Amino acid sequence: MLGKWVFDRPYTEAQLPKQLGSQKQSTFEEMQQQLAASLIPVLIGKLDGMTVTFTSKEMIVTTKEGSGQALTYEILERPTADSWRIKKSDGKVETYYREGERLASDASGDIRMRVYLKRGAQ
């Protein structure tokens, strides 16, 4: 997990149909999912160009414009050999998954979407 990671827009977009169509839903849930699907391009646009750098103690998130934030984190547990559950200094808990050459995390909030990162230049 350590090192620099870059938002992988093409791979994330390619995985969306699998994510959005993976569950049988009620009519209300289907309407919520359609609304979420309409918001996904906006979310992806905000993530485009984002980098995440993990050091042994810090997570540095930077936008394509160069602004961002640095948070300390601690690893709470390793549910599997390829996953890390971390607690950030802002109190949020996130899980990261190694999927082949990529690092993935579920976007937080009302939109359920997995975001993929690829190794960046060190």
Image (cartoon, grey):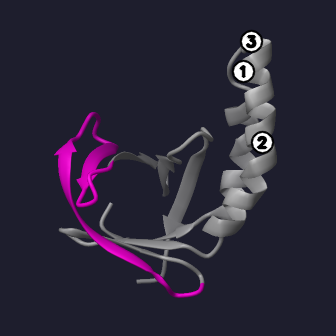
Q: Earlier in the sequence, mark 1 or mark 2?
A: 1
User: On the image, numbered disc 3 is attached to which residue?
Assistant: 26
User: Looking at the picture, which amino acid does disc 2 mark?
Assistant: Ala
User: Label 1, on which residue?
Assistant: 29
Q: Is residue 71 found inside the magenta-colored segment of the image?
A: yes
Residue drawn at x 28%, y 40% is: 81
Quadrant in the picture for the N terminus: bottom left
Secondary element type, mark 2? helix
Q: Specify the segment rendered in magenta.
A: 65-92
- Packing grade of label 1 (10 A; few <14, some 14-19, many >=20) is few
Residue 16 appearing in the image: yes
- 96 left or right of 36 in image: left
Observer able to see residue 4: no
| Amino acid type indicated by mark 1 | Glu
Where's residue 73, x and y in %?
Answer: 22, 60
Q: CA distance from mark 1 to mark 3?
A: 5 Å
Q: Nearer the viewer, residue 72 or 32?
A: 32
Q: Please say if 118 is above or below 51.
A: above
Inspect the image, locate mark 3, and give the three-letter code of the amino acid beneath it: Ser
Q: Measure how far apart labels 1 and 2 are at the Cα level.
A: 12 Å
Tag 1 near tag 3, CB within 8 Å: yes
Decide: is 56 above or below 27.
below
Q: Quadrant of residue 59?
A: bottom left
